[in-house]
Amino acid sequence: MLPAAAVFHFPWEINSGVVQDGASVRTFGRLVSYQPEESRATLSAQHASKEHNVIIRTMFVEPFNPIIGAQYIVLGETENAEEVGVMVLARVLNCVDGVNIALLQKAINEQRSFFKERECKQGDVAWPESAT
Amino acid sequence: MQAATMDPVEEPPSILWGLDPIFSAFARLYVRDILQMTESTQVPGIYFYKSHPIYKVDVLGTVVYKREREDFFCYGVDDGTGVINCLCWKNDLLKEEEDPGKSTGKHSDVSYGNFNPVAELKKLKQAQQKRCRLEIGEVLRVRGPVKTSRQQREIMASTYYKVNDPVMTAQIAWMMEVPQLYRECYDKPLQLQCSATGDSAVSTLSKAVNIIKDFFKQRSVTKFRPYDIQDLLQPLIYSQAQTASEDQEPVAGPSSCQQLRQLLKKVLDILQDEGVIYRKVKSQDEVYHVTAQDKDLLLVVKDIIREDSKREKYAEKGCHILHILSAARQRHSLNISKAALEQVLKFLECSSDIVSTSDTHYTMF
């Protein structure tokens, strides 16, 4: 069976409650820490002069080559853990160091505004929208 | 997963599908839209996005699922809006690689300097194989027709390859481009009004001109009289009469015979204006020559250019078209129009008999 589509989210949205528990997401961030014994990594991104962390569970993508400080793209399901808040259970974790983050954000927004525009036009008929 | 089928009334008639440029293109749709397109009730295997008929698509996304069979790979591709199965056939190359006994052939390594074609070819093949075998998390580009098998939409890849995208340039470019494509093409209804229900008199005329031109080409006609080709236009008059009578009771008008003659006259006028045909001698006997097939005329024009390009006056630039025209009128026929001469020159240039040095000068080597 195919997994659900992983919709792009900004790292600062993952913990903000916009994303439903168990939803498939993809997001990005700088790898700031990795604890192999716990299979846990942390991606971090700056937004509005605040540092936002996303905890990644890496058991499905191990072994991987952790480059601390590099940009990563993660794709997986969110999971609400009591102690740490929302975590992403990674299915894909790719190093994309050198990516133009500003352009990527623009592309994500571009795509979102397109879907929003389309929804508005079609009114209540239309494409069942999963949370974008 | 699929939306209900579209009301057949809403579906554009299949005869018009080919007129939609999106139909013959690989549409770069979001996977979500590919999964939700309605299948045609007229022809299974054709889908509709809005009113656009679609049967092949172009997708870029992350591989999130993979299964390998003897003959094909099955990749689940996720573009952020949906996940779709892509059936990617292995080519012979990829199957060959699986039994390594074959690949150690005893090619005598003929090397040209440091370049060894056999080794290079092997490298090329390896590179190609690498691009066909993907792991989860890698980026795949797939083009091919959409199929529905066991109630599941999938793409039958006609081409597929791994995209090397270490800093996401390809993915970002794709994300920026696709919304534009939607706004400019996919979300716009097809406008056919002007051509489909345009002025039928005009389109009949252009149809007639094309019929005659095709006839000249197929039969290599050199000369003809109007009544020789009159019958070719007969079907057009009939179809015109039929469409008219569906709309209203036939009113007293020109008989079909008269219509035919009028149409033929118009066609001949157009062809003469274009220079496709000309009359060598204007007499009672209406004989038309097909310009490009008139061997005498071609010879005359060739002679003029050959002789005159040698003259000092024309040696540098070649002969001006108006000079050739006046010479041809003197030697061949007074009735040659400039358009007809242009046809001749075009024909001679296509067969490399002459060379144009500017858009009005011609020479010969």
Image (spheres, grey):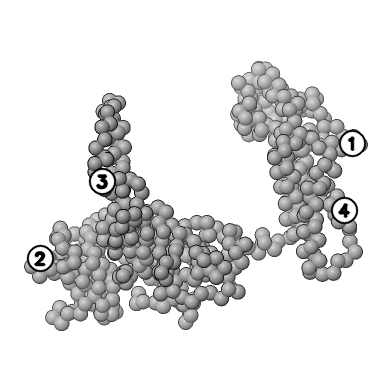
Sort mark 1 into few (<14), some (14-19) or many (20+) by Cα contacts within 10 Å: few
Sort mark 3 into few (<14), some (14-19) or many (20+) by Cα contacts within 10 Å: few
Are callouts 4 and 1 both on one chain? yes
Q: Which residue is mark 2?
A: A36
Q: Which residue is mark 1?
A: B285
How many angstroms separate mark 3 from mark 2 (CA)? 38 Å
Question: Is A131 drawn above or below residue B127 in the view shown?
Answer: below
B7 lies left or right of B131: right
Q: Are marks 3 and 4 in contact (CB under 8 Å)?
A: no
Q: Amino acid at mark 2?
A: Pro
How many angstroms separate mark 3 from mark 4 (CA)? 74 Å
Q: Chain of mark 3?
A: B
Foreground label between 3 and 4: 3
**How far from the left and from the top, in percent, is residue B329?**
79, 28
Q: Amino acid at mark 4?
A: Cys
Q: Amino acid at mark 3?
A: Asp
Q: Are marks 3 and 2 in contact (CB under 8 Å)?
A: no
Q: Residue at x 55, y 58 (%)?
A: B21
Are callouts 1 and 2 both on one chain? no
**How far from the left and from the top, in percent, is residue B257?**
87, 53
Give the mark nearer the N terminus: 3 vs 4. Answer: 3
Q: Amino acid at mark 1?
A: Asp
Q: Does residue B254 show up? A: yes
Q: Chain of mark 4?
A: B
Q: Which residue is mark 4?
A: B257
